Image: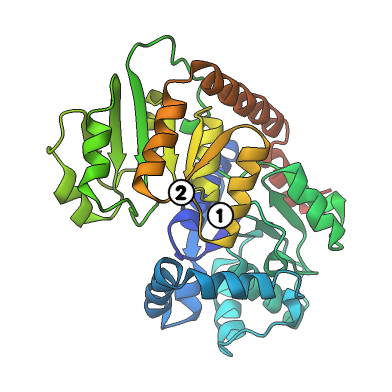
């Protein structure tokens, strides 16, 4: 069995989801060949510039990004052209060389590239789209898609309302590494452990007063993962007695298993890593539309709260939650219930049927 997972590096969430899918598939099908590929880079020689401009857009021009996102929310993705006219030829060359038995797309642009190729060639190659945010945005939807993997039942219903057959939509949660799904045994501890993450770009408050207040919070030990923000790492490391600073790490699951509360941006991947770790979430006030959807889901399900952007208000939100044993336990219990519900939909079982030659996930 040869499975090709195609994605893009607009942030690291899509890549992380792809690697988690690869891990799950290799555990289920040890003899399979499962490859993760940056399809954006493969089909566009300007991909590095695209990624840089995307980072600038989401950090400095989020208003424009959100405007575009809302404008295209219900626009038929199949009607929106791709800019690179060489895409079909490059994809044809790639698939001819790799000869996959199934394609899994974890980014909407990649799903669109593969869907366009399928329509133009008439190929029956099974195509799975893994939606990596809690969204029903039309950019993910294509008529030639054989199967959709989504985070929650609500997203399944929203896709169905847009005309996608319920029979090909599966609620699997957003993919995370198996290590996040290990049993959780935090027990009773006097010290409170706060984990702070800023996403793959390491976006954090800049004021020293924020970290000084964290350092003096009674009975609280804080771990900050700065990601790829080297400047912030250099500024904070070894500076505070009760704050441990970690740069980029691929062992986030260890820090989540240890923490009582995580303060993080509400990206789809991080959110489901926290859910499978049964770790209550205090989300930075989101500014991207899809992250607003994620935050609303957390609050609605009682699994998290939202903290204001201003450092003082954020600190107040931390204090209100980190010492509240009842609320933390309730959030964790609701995450456990969702985790059990999602594990009933076996991703590997779904893909086993797809790659068995049926061509659809039904």
175 left or right, relative to 242:
right
Percent x, y of residue 232: 22, 52
Q: Say if 47 sits above or below 189 in the image.
A: below
Instruction: Categorize mark 1 by other alpha carbons within 10 Å: few (<14), some (14-19), many (20+).
Output: many
Percent x, y of residue 193: 35, 24
Residue lying at the far left of the rendered structure? 238
Local secondary structure at mark 2: loop
Q: Which mark is residue 309?
A: none
Q: Is residue 361 visible?
A: no
Foreground pick, 91 / 154: 154
Q: Residue at x 15, y 34 (%)?
A: 240
Local secondary structure at mark 1: helix
Q: Say if 329 sits above or below 2 in the image.
A: above
Q: Which mark is residue 291?
A: 1
Q: Which mark is residue 265?
A: 2
Rounded to the nearest angstrom, the CA distance separating label 1 from label 2 is: 8 Å
């Amino acid at each position: 069995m040869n499975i090709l997972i195609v994605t893009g590096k607009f942030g690291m969430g899509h890549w992380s989801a792809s690697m988690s899918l690869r891990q799950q598939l290799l555990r289920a099908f040890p003899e399979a060949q499962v490859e993760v590929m940056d399809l954006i880079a493969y089909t566009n020689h300007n991909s590095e510039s695209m990624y840089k401009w995307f980072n600038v857009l989401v950090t400095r021009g989020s208003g424009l990004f959100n405007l575009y996102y809302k404008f295209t929310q219900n626009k038929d993705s199949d009607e929106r052209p791709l800019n690179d006219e060489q895409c079909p030829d490059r994809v044809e060359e790639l698939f001819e060389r790799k000869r996959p038995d199934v394609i899994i797309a974890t980014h909407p642009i990649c799903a669109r590239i593969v869907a366009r190729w399928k329509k133009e060639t008439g190929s029956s190659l099974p195509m799975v789209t893994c939606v990596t945010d809690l969204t029903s945005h039309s950019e993910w939807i294509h008529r030639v898609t054989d199967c959709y993997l989504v985070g929650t039942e609500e997203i399944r219903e929203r896709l169905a309302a847009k005309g996608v057959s319920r029979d090909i939509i599966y609620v699997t949660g957003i993919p995370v590494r198996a290590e996040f799904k290990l049993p959780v045994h935090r027990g009773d501890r006097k010290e409170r452990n706060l984990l702070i993450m800023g996403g793959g770009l390491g976006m954090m408050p800049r004021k020293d007063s924020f970290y000084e207040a964290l350092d003096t919070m009674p009975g609280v030990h804080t771990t900050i993962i700065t990601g790829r923000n080297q400047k912030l790492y250099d500024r904070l490391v070894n500076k505070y007695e009760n704050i441990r600073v970690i740069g980029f790490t691929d062992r986030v699951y260890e820090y989540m298993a240890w923490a009582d509360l995580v303060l993080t941006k509400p990206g789809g991947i991080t959110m489901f890593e926290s859910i499978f770790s049964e770790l209550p979430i205090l989300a930075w006030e989101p500014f991207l539309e899809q992250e607003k959807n994620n935050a609303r889901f957390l609050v609605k399900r009682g699994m998290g709260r939202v903290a204001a952007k201003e450092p003082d208000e954020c600190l107040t939100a931390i204090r209100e939650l980190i010492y509240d044993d009842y609320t933390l336990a309730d959030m964790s219990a609701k995450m456990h219930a969702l985790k059990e519900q999602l594990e009933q939909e076996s991703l590997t079982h779904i893909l086993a049927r797809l790659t068995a030659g049926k061509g659809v996930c039904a």
